[in-house]
Amino acid sequence: MSVGHVARAIEESGTPTVVVMVRAFRHVAERMMLPRTVITRHPMGRPVGAAGDAERQASVIQAAMDVLDRAVEGGTIVELEPPFRPGSLD
């Protein structure tokens, strides 16, 4: 939940945020009504993917940037379904 509180404080300063969480914490994102959240199906503690998997990490970050660019209302949650690719959020 700390990430959500930090994101909220950053948003209040005028800077948009996207929180990336593992699926186990989706209920937290829903309850906190975070502005923009990306949910992944990675293991706990690895929301952007396994250490050393630069391709997967880049894909998650690109998906988060896509959400940042396209979300039009608060509380937007996008759950990435495997396999996903950057740009597949159209």
Image: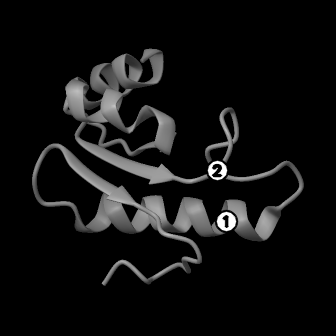
The answer to whether residue 9 is above or below residue 36 is: above
Query: In what element is the residue under mark 1?
Result: helix
Image side of residue 67 versus residue 83, left or right: left
Q: Amino acid at mark 1?
A: Ala
Quadrant in which the C terminus is drawn: bottom left
Nearer mark to the viewer, of 1 and 2: 2
Query: Residue 53 location in percent, x, y?
Result: 83, 61
Q: Which residue is mark 2?
A: 42
- Relative to 75, does residue 31 appear above or below in the rendering? above
Q: How many marks?
A: 2
Front residue of 46/63: it is 46
Q: Which amino acid, by three-letter code, is at mark 2?
A: His
Q: Position of residue 55 (x, y in %)?
A: 76, 71
Disc assigned to residue 58: 1
The colour scheme of the drawn protein is one colour
Which of the 4 image quadrants contains residue 46? top right
The part of the image, by quadrant, that contains residue 47 is: top right
Say if 50 sits above or below 62 in the image: above
**In this image, 21 relative to 14: left or right?**
right
> Who's the residue at 28% across and 51% down the image?
77
Between 5 and 50, the one nearer to me in the picture: 50
